[in-house]
Image (cartoon, rainbow, N blue to C red):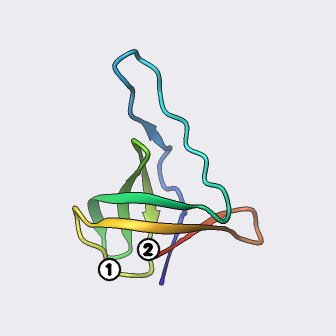
Amino acid sequence: MAISINSVLPVLAAQEAGGVAHELVLQSGSVVNAKVLKVLSADLVRIAIAGLSVDVSTEVPLQQGQNLQLAVTQTKDGGVRLAM
């Protein structure tokens, strides 16, 4: 099962106490932890990865509050795919 990242809105950086924003790097071959913040529709969810929020399309039903471990791979068109 996989979640394809198709960013609908810009990634929103959660700022730390000092006003410094996080930077997210999704490297192919890595595994990232994510949490479903909000279910926007049947195939669209907002997830948080490393303090950043991003809206992504999903191929599997997810629930708000669900914790995910996602394997990162590159797509042929230069995009990123996250697989559960």
Left or right: 10 as drawn, with respect to 81: left
> In the depicted view, which residue is nearer to us: 10 or 20?
20
Above or below — where is 23 with respect to 29?
A: above
Label annotation for residue 24? none
Count the labels in the image. Answer: 2
The residue shown at (42%, 67%) is 69
> In the depicted view, which residue is nearer to us: 8 or 68?
68
Packing grade of label 1 (10 A; few <14, some 14-19, many >=20) is few
Left or right: 10 as drawn, with respect to 43: right
Left or right: 21 as drawn, with respect to 61: right
- Whole-percent x, y for residue 57 in the image: 46, 69
Packing grade of label 2 (10 A; few <14, some 14-19, many >=20) is some
Disc 1 secondary structure class: loop
- The amino acid beneath tag 2 is Thr
Q: Are marks 2 and 1 in contact (CB under 8 Å)?
A: yes
The residue shown at (41%, 17%) is 19
Disc 2 secondary structure class: loop
Quarter occupied by residue 61: bottom left
Residue located farthest toward the top when viewing the structure as drawn = 18
Residue located farthest toward the front when viewing the structure as drawn = 30
- Whole-percent x, y for residue 7 in the image: 52, 56
Residue under label 2, please give it: 58
- Whole-percent x, y for residue 12 in the image: 43, 39
The residue shown at (34%, 19%) is 17
- The amino acid beneath tag 1 is Pro
Residue under label 1, please give it: 61
Quarter occupied by residue 59: bottom left
- Whole-percent x, y for residue 15 in the image: 39, 27
Left or right: 38 as drawn, with respect to 49: left
Distance from the alpha carbon under mark 2 to that under mark 1: 7 Å
> In the depicted view, which residue is nearer to us: 61 or 72?
72
The residue shown at (45%, 62%) is 56
